Image (spheres, rainbow, N blue to C red):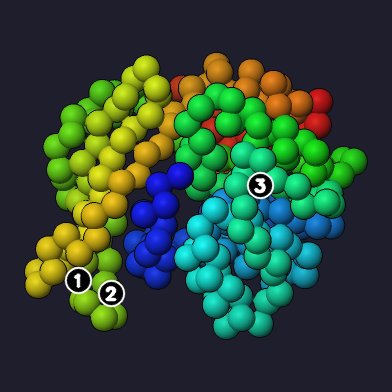
Amino acid sequence: MSQAFYSHARLYDLMFPGGGPAVDFYRADADRQGGRVLELGCGTGHKLIPIASDGHPCVGLDFSSDMLAEAQRKANERGVAVEWMQGDMRAFDLDRTFDFVFITANSLLHLQEAEDLVSCFRSVRRHLAPGARFVFDVFNPSVRLLAEADGVRRTRESLSFIDPDRGNVSVDVAEIYDAPAQVTRGTWYLSTDSEPDFVVAPLEIRSIFPQELPLLVSLGGLRLVERFGDWSGRPFAVDTPLQLCICESA
C-alpha cells in the first residue's frame, strides 16, 4: 500500500495541490446522482471536501491515518462535515449503501493483485444503492513510457514545490517496471539544498491495461457502462491519458 509515501500528508498536498478538472468532474457527477457519497482512497480530501461542501452526506475511507488526519484538519478549517474512516478498500463493510461511490487519482492501482481488485469491486457492489453509480479513473498505460522505467534517478521538475518551512523542494524519482506483475516500482526522493533526501519513500503502482479492465470489473459484479479518455468526456482511445470508467451493478 506504499504507506511510507503517504505518511507525509502535508508534503503530499504541497506536491499534489489538487483542484482542476478532476474535482469539477466528480463534483458534477455527485450532483447528478444526489444522495450519499463514498470515496475510497480519499487521501486528504481533495475531491470529497468540495463535494461535501455542496451539501452531500459524505464518507471518506483511506488506509493511511496520516492522510485522514490532514483531511479532517482541512474539513474543519472549511467548516465541512465529512465522516472519515480508516479502512482497506479491498474489503470493507460500512453497513449502509451509497448513491455515488468513486476512486480517483490512480488510488485503485495500489491494489497489485487481480484478486485484490476483484475483491474491491465486490465490496463496492455491496455498497451500491439501487440506481447508484461507481466511477473511477486510472491512467491509460503507455508501453513506451513503461519501457523507459530503467531505474535511473531523474528530477521531476513539474513536481517541485515550495515548503513554507524548508523552502524549495525538488522531487527525484527512480522507477523500474516489473512486466510480469504489471507493477511500476519506484523510489521517490524529496530534497532541499540543505537537506538532501530528507524523504525517501517507495511507491508501487499497478497498470491495468484496457482489455483486462472490463473483465476485472465484471468479475466484481459490476458492469462498465462507459469509458472516457479525459475529463472533458472524450471517448476512450489508444492515445487518451485516462481510463475514466462509469460503472453500475451488473
Alpha carbon separation for disc pair 2 and 1: 6 Å
Disc 3 element? strand
Residue lying farthest right?
130
Q: Quadrant of residue 244?
A: top right
Nearest to N terminus: mark 2 or mark 1: 2
Secondary element under disc 2, as helix, strand or loop, is: strand
Name the residue at 58% across, 55% down.
Answer: 62
The quadrant the C terminus occupies is top right
Dot 1 alpha-carbon crowd within 10 angstroms: few under 14, some 14 to 19, many 20 or more: few
Task: Residue at 71%, 54% (x, y): give it.
Answer: 38
Query: How many angstroms separate mark 2 from mark 3 (CA)?
Result: 30 Å
Vertical placement of residue 242 versus 101, above or below: above
Q: Position of residue 175 (x, y in %)?
A: 25, 37
Does the rendering let one see residue 176?
Answer: yes
Query: Residue drawn 65% across and 61% down?
Result: 85
Do the residues under discs 2 and 1 have CB atoms within 8 angstroms?
Answer: yes
- In the displayed structure image, the side of residue 48 where residue 183 appears, left or right: left
Kindly check if marks 2 and 3 are in contact, taking CB atoms under 8 A apart as contact.
Answer: no
Residue 203 percent across, percent down from the top left: 35, 44
List the residue tagged with mark 1.
Answer: 168
Pointer 2: what residue?
A: 163
Is tag 2's residue or tag 3's residue first in the polypeptide sequence? Answer: 3
